Amino acid sequence: MTTAPLTNLWQATANAPTFAQTHDAQSVDLAIIGGGFSGCSAALEAAKAGLSVILLEAETIGFGGSGRNVGLVNAGLWTPPQEVEDTLGKAAGEKLNTALAGAPALVFDLIDQHQIECDAVRNGTLHCAQSYYHKKDLDKRLDQLSARGAPVQMLDEAETQKRLGSTHFVASLFDPRAGTIHPLKFAQGLAKAAQDAGAKIVEHCPATAVQQNGAWRVATAQGEFTAKYVIIATNAYDHKHVRHPKNQFSTVQFFQSATAPLSDDQAAHILPNREGTWDCATVMTSLRLDAENRLILGAIGSLDHATAPFHKMWGRQKLRDLYPDLPDMPFTHQWCGKIAMTSDHLPKIMDFDGKGYAPFGYSGRGIGPGTLFGTQMVKALINQDESLLPLAPIEQYDEPMTAAKSTYYECGAAAMHAGYPVLKHAKIG
Ligand SMILES: Cc1cc2nc3c(=O)[nH]c(=O)nc-3n(C[C@H](O)[C@H](O)[C@H](O)COP(=O)(O)OP(=O)(O)OC[C@H]3O[C@@H](n4cnc5c(N)ncnc54)[C@H](O)[C@@H]3O)c2cc1C
């Protein structure tokens, strides 16, 4: 078996725009900490509204989840809409569901408006059932989504197998609102559009402290400055604990492996419509093509952990099972990233007296939510109207046992992947 180096395909295939490395800010309207979808969309919205804005990124734009993800631009959350309403209450749940149903449109509109070259394909996504037992989950989602006006459609076994080019699945839920992007290029494109609109984007410049004392004071190694408003968008990659000193979420690692580009003949049969896909397994698997027809397989698990060999072996075997006719193709890129997972799997927005926000915990669905939350947080600050947020902000939030839960997720994924040769016959894995 060929072992691929740990390189991120998105990093290897992006052309990073040039951003500043230094700042001499004294005072700004809005300071943003973190250059992922949340921070970059906020910077763009603020600059377009005429605010003076500085975005500090500790590493490079898209270093966190935004530059590592699968690139599925989905409507809604992982949590089905009825559960969202049961958890938040009907009115608040409906508000969040409605806002997130429109999130792919926001993402694709921003891509169009700012001519962001990020390999955007809006051909929908397929949530696939690997057995009739798993299809029950899709039936439930179909009912709930249809009742809320979503144009989703159940595809039967023959159609699903034709779309995937694999006999592995018995049905799929097609969502035409969704699509795929090169996620790092999208994050970089948002930051470039914000810079073009007047925002100062500074890379390799971690905020070392953010304090509210009348105005906000933001400290960096290059000096301190003040800000009227702050958005702390560090999410799962919080560095220096600028967001909050306590535990607010557990982390789930997700890794991906990409093959070399498929031949035209192979690509004609595998995902010919280029939908993004994922399955119904507890330890979920994702599958998509990139712009060069590399097949990208993803699953829960860390490649930075002692459990990595189990995940890598599973990847090899899973690809063979999905596509037995495909000759063994080495993985040319493998990488992983951290997902911030809250206990109810719903995102949160911390509120700092209406003078700042910190969103986190998108729980695996951050392209649409991050872009929407970033945009709406700025509107809420400018108008001093928190009803513009898709979700009521909270002042306090702590979760117990987050480290133990993170270990549990990793060990559970490793056990499923180690046991895959046996479990697959029961269609569990
Ligand atoms: C492997 C993986 C697959 C995923 N797949 C999907 C998917 O297909 N679809 C989907 O919708 N979502 C997906 N997600 C979730 C999604 O990627 C995240 O929810 C989203 O990227 C979060 O964006 P963000 O801007 O809030 O945070 P991030 O992108 O994590 O950005 C936070 C940034 O803050 C910076 N930072 C931290 N501390 C400081 C500091 N002190 N000073 C300055 N900067 C700082 C970090 O360096 C980082 O760049 C996936 C996530 C992962 C990890």
Image (spheres, rainbow, N blue to C red):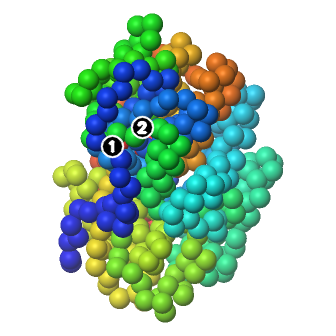
Instruction: Say left or right for 173 vs 324.
Output: right
Give the secondary structure at mark 1.
loop
Mark 2 within 8 Å of ligand 1, using the beta carbon = no
The quadrant of the image that shows the N terminus is bottom left
Q: Residue at x 23, y 70 (%)?
A: 4
**Badge 2, how many Cα within 10 Å: few under 14, some, many 20+?**
many
Query: Residue 242's quadrant in the figure?
Result: top left
Q: Residue at x 61, y 72 (%)?
A: 170
Q: What is the x, y in percent for residue 180?
A: 55, 63
- Label 2 – label 1 distance at C-alpha: 7 Å
Instruction: Say left or right for 201 vs 153.
Output: left
Give the amino acid type for the residue marked by disc 2 in the picture. Answer: Lys
Say which mark, if any, is on residue 210: none
Q: To which residue does mark 2 refer? A: 200
Q: To which residue does mark 1 refer? A: 20
Residue 310 higher or lower than 82, as above or below: below
Is tag 2's residue or tag 1's residue first in the polypeptide sequence? 1
The residue most toward the top is 214
